[in-house]
Image: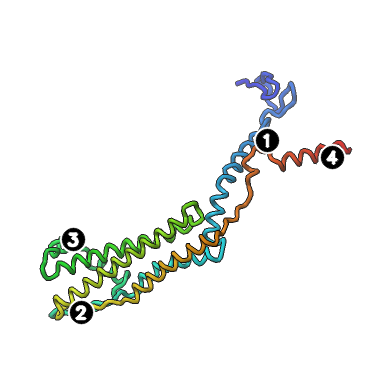
Amino acid sequence: MAQYCPKCNYKLKITDWRQECPNCGVNVLYYGIEDSLRKEADIAEYNYARRKPKFDRLKFSLIGHPLSITRIVLGLLPIVALLLPMGSVKYILPFAEHSATVNLVSIIKFFVSNGFDVDALSAMFGSDLLGKAIIAFCAALVSLALMALTALVGFFMLTLSCSPRGFQRNVGFAVTGMVLATVSFVSYAVMINTLNGAIPEIFKGTVNPLCYIVVMAIFAAEIALNVIYKKMDIKVKYTDVSELLLPYAERPSTLAKQKQRAAGANAQ
């Protein structure tokens, strides 16, 4: 099918098999390809220039300042602290005796091995002997899981620390973690004390306050570090790519090159 030359609008015939237009001599196949490539490059550079400040904030949140690196380390410590022993439990049955250290790993192993019997727990809620301990157990378990989730999400959200609401977000996660840690520890202590008093010949448990103190100290250190960071008013170091937001022909560097070329041509 015949086509037209994109430059001179000459109607090409089937016999015009060469790439060049027989009327004006332009390469029909590649005519205007430089302009098309320049437009695509302009779009790519414009999109890059718009994303670059966000990338700079992300990079600065992670490794842009010594306090940024310290903040990342502190953000990971609450998750590690969940491996510390909250206490220990020991129960003695007629033909079995079992003891274990209570921390996040042992709790997960327990439920993986034995499952979670919701019906049995629901039936024990109304027990005069064990009802209070079971309620405290569920509260401790739920708050511990929420604290672990909060610490994990807060750790990943540290990458957005240099965003407009990064300070409020970081402090909010740390405060939430402290509240959940307190609820979990108090509920666990209530459960242990209740079971020790209700069935002392069968159950013996202990509470380790050091674990709670360590977790609270880590969250408090996170809050203090974020406050120091805020007070120091540390600024993000941005790479200036504002020129790439302009079309190629309107950029100062492009205009400068054109002036240099024009000056060189006049000198010759």
Q: Amino acid at mark 3?
A: Val
Helix, strand or loop for disc 4: helix
Question: Colour mode?
Answer: rainbow
Between circles 2 and 1, the one closer to the viewer is 2
Nearer to the camera, 131 or 176: 176
Helix, strand or loop for disc 1: helix
* x and y, in percent, of residue 155 in the image: 43, 61
Between circles 1 and 3, the one closer to the viewer is 3
Q: Earlier in the sequence, mark 3 or mark 4?
A: 3
Separation of disc 3 and disc 4 at Cα? 85 Å
Q: Is residue 150 above or below residue 99?
A: above
**What crowding class fits label 3: few (fewer than 14 Cα within 10 Å), some (14-19), or many (20 or more)?**
few
Nearer to the camera, 188 or 235: 235
* x and y, in percent, of residue 253 in the image: 72, 43
| Residue at 39 percent of width and 67 percent of height | 79
Q: Amino acid at mark 2?
A: Lys
Residue on which the image places disc 4: 264
Q: Are the residues flagged by discs 2 and 1 in contact, CB closer than 8 Å?
A: no
Helix, strand or loop for disc 2: strand
Q: Earlier in the sequence, mark 3 or mark 2?
A: 3
Q: Earlier in the sequence, mark 2 or mark 4?
A: 2
Separation of disc 2 and disc 4 at Cα? 93 Å
Helix, strand or loop for disc 3: helix
| Residue at 36 percent of width and 63 percent of height | 177
Q: Earlier in the sequence, mark 2 or mark 1?
A: 1
Residue on which the image places disc 1: 34
| Residue at 37 percent of width and 69 percent of height | 216
Q: Which label sits on residue 204?
A: 2
**What crowding class fits label 2: few (fewer than 14 Cα within 10 Å), some (14-19), or many (20 or more)?**
some
Residue on which the image places disc 3: 118
Q: Amino acid at mark 1?
A: Glu
Q: Earlier in the sequence, mark 1 or mark 3?
A: 1
